[in-house]
Amino acid sequence: MSSPTLSGDFTPVFNPPLSSTQTKLLDMLEDATEQLMINTDFDASFRICDRGLECLAHEEEADVRGELKAGFCIVGIQALAELNLWTGVLAWVLKHYEHMEDIPAKILQMCILLYSKVGEPAAVREATQAWLRSPSNIHLNEFRTVAELYLLYVLLPLGRTDQARELVVGELGGATFTEEQRQTALEIIEEEEVAHVNADCRVTASTQGTGSFLHKVEALLRVTYRRLTAASGSFPFHKLVLAAVILYMLVLRLDPALPSSFMWISKLHELLRQMWNFTAAPYYRAQKD
């Protein structure tokens, strides 16, 4: 399985001199990259990366260790993706970084894109959330990119629009995004909410029982009636009945000629009778009295 996250040469550049151990580790990283990019031997590439990370545990120079660890992880993630072993990517990364907030930004970005591509964005939600909340990461240059990927490829696909909105307009979003970016993000969130509502309506119409659906239609019509009467003071009942029939027929796509529609028409009649009792009957009873 190909992943869109790897391009170019990931071999880190160091100022000489390097120790013999560091030179050996750098050679291993170059070998792993060659196995991945040129020989397409993904299994060999991953084994080299795993072995290199184990050797790095004894490296004392922090800067060199950090760059090499990131390099091995980047190549290793790509190798696992190509081997279709993506389910273990995050666990493997955490094995070497221990804490979610310590994962380098470039590696977390790869994980978000990878799990989004395979349709499992929930796998990185907790890790990304912990990373964004860490004070040590807020001032990183890549912080905004991670936040954007989290919004677009994790929260919205999972339907967590409330959390997405909080990310944008909350304290974190205020310190991360410009006003224009926040406005654009809110528009995207609203579009996603509308899409989810439409999808839920389609699922309801096709899979749920008639009683539950009729209850929702009735509630919708009652809300519509209350809004219309509140706006204009009065609204002819026959127009509301016509609107109900049109709405009912459009939503359910009934063909009155089909025997299967008889039950729905009967339910519609019952619904309209209930609406009459709810809206118009008290008025006419009062006139008779």
Image (cartoon, rainbow, N blue to C red):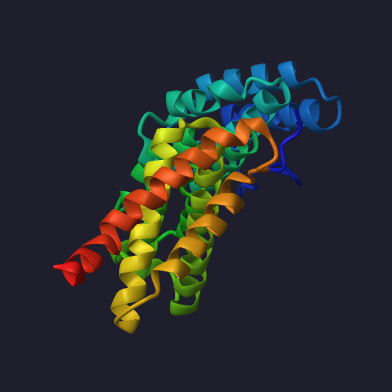
Please tell me whether residue 236 is drawn above or below residue 83 in the rendered image: below
Please tell me whether residue 32 is drawn above or below residue 13 in the rendered image: above
Looking at this view, name the residue that lies furthest to the right: 38
Q: Quadrant of the N terminus?
A: top right
Q: Position of residue 148 (x, y in %)?
A: 51, 57
Q: Is residue 161 left or right of residue 2?
A: left
**Residue 223's quadrant in the figure?**
bottom left
Q: Position of residue 91 (x, y in %)?
A: 47, 24
Q: In front here: 123 or 72?
A: 123
Q: In front here: 218 or 236?
A: 236
Q: Is residue 161 left or right of residue 22?
A: left
Q: Is residue 83 left or right of residue 98?
A: right
Q: Is residue 163 visible?
A: no
Identify which residue is drawn at 36% across, 74% down: 228
Q: Position of residue 158 (x, y in %)?
A: 48, 42
Identify which residue is drawn at 47% across, 74% down: 183
- Picture mark count: 0
**Residue 107's quadrant in the figure?**
top right
Q: In front here: 32 or 16?
A: 32
Q: Quadrant of the C terminus?
A: bottom left
Q: Is residue 151 visible?
A: yes
Q: Position of residue 200 (x, y in %)?
A: 50, 44
